[in-house]
Image (spheres, rainbow, N blue to C red):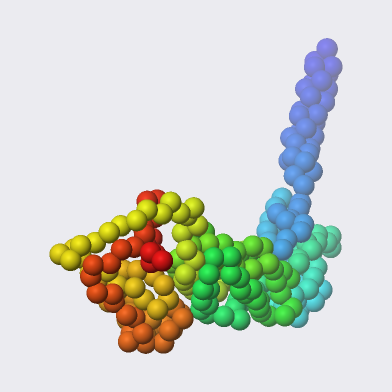
Amino acid sequence: MKDVIRKSITVITIIAMALTLAMPMQAEAKVKVKLNKTEIALNVKKSYNLKVAGTTKKVIWSTSKKSVATVNSKGKITAKKKGTATITAKVSGKKYTCKVTVRQPVTSVTLNKKTATLTKKGATVTLKATAKPTNANQRKVTWKSNNTKVAKVDSNGKVSAVSNGTATITATAADGSKKKAACKVTVKNAGTGCKHDWWIVSTTVDGPLYCRCECGQIFTPDDWQKHSMEAGLNRVYGHGSWSECHPYAKPYNYEECSKCGKRRPLE
């Protein structure tokens, strides 16, 4: 009987020892060795750290194309130029790979004009954007006006005058590089778009002096002085100097729009 008990204890002890030895092996077998990335895209000059999970053993790193992407002994990838490369991590004779796509971002955007002037409502000018370098993956740009009440722009860079004022038209690289270029657009003589309601204004000898310019517009003395100076500087009113702005002697009758306040001569 004692021999039976002794044998049973021995068997149990052996089984327990076998289970104890097998548990770490089973636990280790459940941990899968793998890379944290199997595919990645990087812009030129950018870097990324690859990591091998599930092992503490030595990892040997290599790249299939050093001219496109390099990798150091710690798994740090550095993008060199546009193209693709395969990064390999070798652990205990087994290989794990990651495909690296290197993209060339836009480094600069330029426009064919830095400033533009439109002299009537509906007038247009087409801006042309150039994104460099020529081998960039995405060379398209998006267009935007910071003041659509003055000038609007379509997806092809065509700018249209809406009303008098200034607006900045910006072309931004669509690849996310945030490179951009801008053009300042000035709109003049666009008018108000008003459907005028004219009414006659009569002045008296003691009334105010109203000035009529050669271009046909009527001003108060202060407004006329400003207009005459702009005429001399900008030459956009159909005359070239302030001397061509002639004030009328009072009294003078004229018409004024009840909606927008514009004045015109009473013919």
In the rendered image, the vertical position of residue 147 relative to residue 111, given as above or below: above
Answer whether residue 12 is visible to the viewer in this image: yes
Q: Residue 51 placed where, x, y %?
A: 68, 59
Where on the picture, by quarter, is residue 105? bottom right
Front one among 41 and 90: 41
Work out which quarter of the rendered image holds the N terminus and state it: top right
Identified at 18% across, 66% down, the residue is: 205
Q: Identify the residue at image location x=76%, y=53%.
A: 34
Pick the front one: 6 or 19: 19
Compared across the picture, whether 163 is left or right of 9 comes to left
Quadrant of the rendered image containing residue 111? bottom right
Foreground residue, 103 or 164? 164
Residue 249: x and y in percent read 24, 74
Q: Position of residue 52 (x, y in %)?
A: 71, 57
Give the percent coordinates (x, y) of residue 228. 33, 79
- Residue 22 to residue 97: above or below: above
User: Image check: 125 left or right of 239?
Assistant: right
Residue at the limit of the structure toward the top, as seen here: 1
Q: Nearer the viewer, residue 82 or 267?
A: 267
Q: How many marks?
A: 0
Reply above or below: 4 against 38.
Answer: above
**Res. 74 visible in picture:** no
Q: Residue at x 34, y 56 (%)?
A: 200
On the rendered image, what quadrant is the C terminus found in? Answer: bottom left
Q: Is residue 3 above or below residue 94?
A: above
